[in-house]
Amino acid sequence: MERGRRDCVRWMSAGLLGLLGASSIRAAESGPRLIRLNLPGPRSLPFLPLELIPRLGFDRELGFRLQLRYFNSGVLAAEDMLAGNAGFAAHGFTILATLRAKGKPAVAVAALSDRDTPRALLVRADLARRIKRVEDLKGASIGVSHGSVNTKTYLHMLGEQVLGLHGVAASDVRWVPMAQNWDSVRSVLVSRSADAVLCAEPFVSRAVDAGLARVLLHFNELEGLRRMPGERHLRAVISAPQAGIGNAEREGRALLQMLGKVLAWMATADSGRIVAQLGIEEAAERAELVRLLSRYPDLFPRDPRFDPAAVADTGTLLVALGLLEQTAAVGGLIDERWSGRP
C-alpha cells in the first residue's frame, strides 16, 4: 500500500509540473515579442531616439520588447544583423552601398537623422598649437570608428571627404581604429595613440570639456567651396536584411511605429525632460546632454519616412564617393513598405 501511495504522489507531482510547464509556455507565448536591434554606442547622440523607446515603454505598448545591442561601429552592427543575430541595425546610410557591393544587401527602412551634423575633427590638446588647420594633419594619425576588413564606417568615409576638401588625401594620414563610444575616444586621446580623432556628439563635447582635445573643424561649419557634395544626405538610418524583409512585416511595422512615437514625443518635450528619461547618474553628463540637444534642434526628424530631397542628395554623395555610378541607383538601397507612405 505504501508503494501505491508513493506512485500516486509521483503521478500527481508529474501532473502538476506538466500543468505548470504548459502555463509557462502559454505565458511566454502571450508575452511581448522580441525585436533585436543593433546600434553603435551606448549614448551616441544620433541614435538617442532608439535608446528612449524602451525607457518610455513605446515597445511594450505595441506588444513587443525592443532589445538594444551595442557595437563599436555601425558597420559591425550591420554585419552582425546580416549574420542573422538581429532583425535590424542602426548606422550611417553610406555603408549600405558598400555592403551591397560585397554581396551583403541590406535596405534602409527608416530615417533617424535630419539636417544637423553633430560631428567634428578634434586635435589633441597638447598638439593644438602645432595643428591649427585641417591642412596641418598631413602626416598625422587620426582616430576613427573602425568597420571591417573591406567596409569603412560612415564617419571614416565622411572624414576622407572633409580631408580631401582641404587638400589632404586619405593616404596622407594614418587611421587609428577606435570604437564609437566615450571610453574608446577618451582612451585614444589619453594614451596619445592618435594626434586627432573624428567622432560624434556627445563625445566631441566631453573630450573638449575634459581638456583632452580642441575642435579643429565642426562639420556644421563647412562653408563655400568646401561644402561636401550631397550636403543634405541621409545620415543615420535603420536597416533590415533585404533577403528577409518580406518575412519581417509585423516587426518592421511595429518598429517604425515605435520610432514615430518617440520622435513625436521628443518634438514636444524639452531637453531636460528628454535627458531625464535616460537614467544618467552623473550630473555633469546630464547637463552636457541637455546643452547638446538644445544646440542641435534639427538633429532628429519628426517623421521617420525618407525626405525625397535628402534621398537625392544621398545619391549625389554616393556617386562622389565612388560607391554608385548613377544618383538614381540610391533608390535601390531604400525600402519604405512599412512606413505608410503611399
Image (cartoon, rainbow, N blue to C red):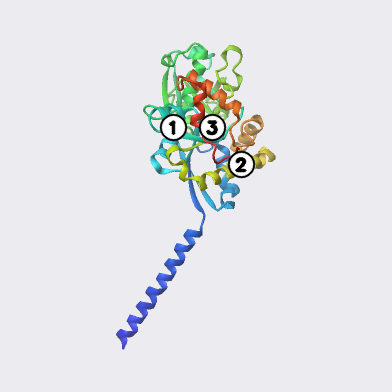
Asked if marks 3 and 2 touch (Cβ < 8 Å), the reply is: no
Spot occupied by residue 160 in the image (x, y as percentages of width and height): 47, 19
Rounded to the nearest angstrom, the CA distance separating label 3 from label 2 is 15 Å
Spot occupied by residue 276 in the image (x, y as percentages of width and height): 63, 43
Tell me what residue is drawn at x 31 percent, y 88 percent. 1
Amino acid type of the residue that numbered disc 3 sits on in the rendered structure: Ala
- Image quadrant where residue 11 sits: bottom left
Q: Is residue 327 visible?
A: yes
Residue position marked by numbered label 1 in the rendering:
75
Tell me what residue is drawn at x 38 percent, y 75 percent. 13
Residue position marked by numbered label 2 in the rendering:
260
Q: Residue furthest bottom?
A: 1
Amino acid type of the residue that numbered disc 1 sits on in the rendered structure: Val
Nearer to me, 126 or 285 = 285
Please tell me the numbered disc located at residue 9: none
| Residue count near mark 1 (Cα–Cα under 10 Å), binned few <14, some 14–19, many ≥20 | many
Q: Is residue 262 left or right of residue 76?
A: right
Tell me what residue is drawn at x 33 percent, y 82 percent. 6
Please tell me the numbered disc located at residue 236: 3
- Above or below, 84 against 155 in this view is below
Going from N to C along the chain, the mark reached first, 2 or 1, is 1
Q: What element carries label 3?
A: strand
Q: Which residue lies furthest to the front in this view?
A: 342
Rounded to the nearest angstrom, the CA distance separating label 1 from label 3 is 12 Å
Asked if marks 1 and 3 touch (Cβ < 8 Å), the reply is: no
Q: Is mark 2 on a helix, strand or loop?
A: helix
Q: Quadrant of the C terminus?
A: top right
Going from N to C along the chain, the mark reached first, 3 or 2, is 3
- Above or below, 143 against 267 in this view is above
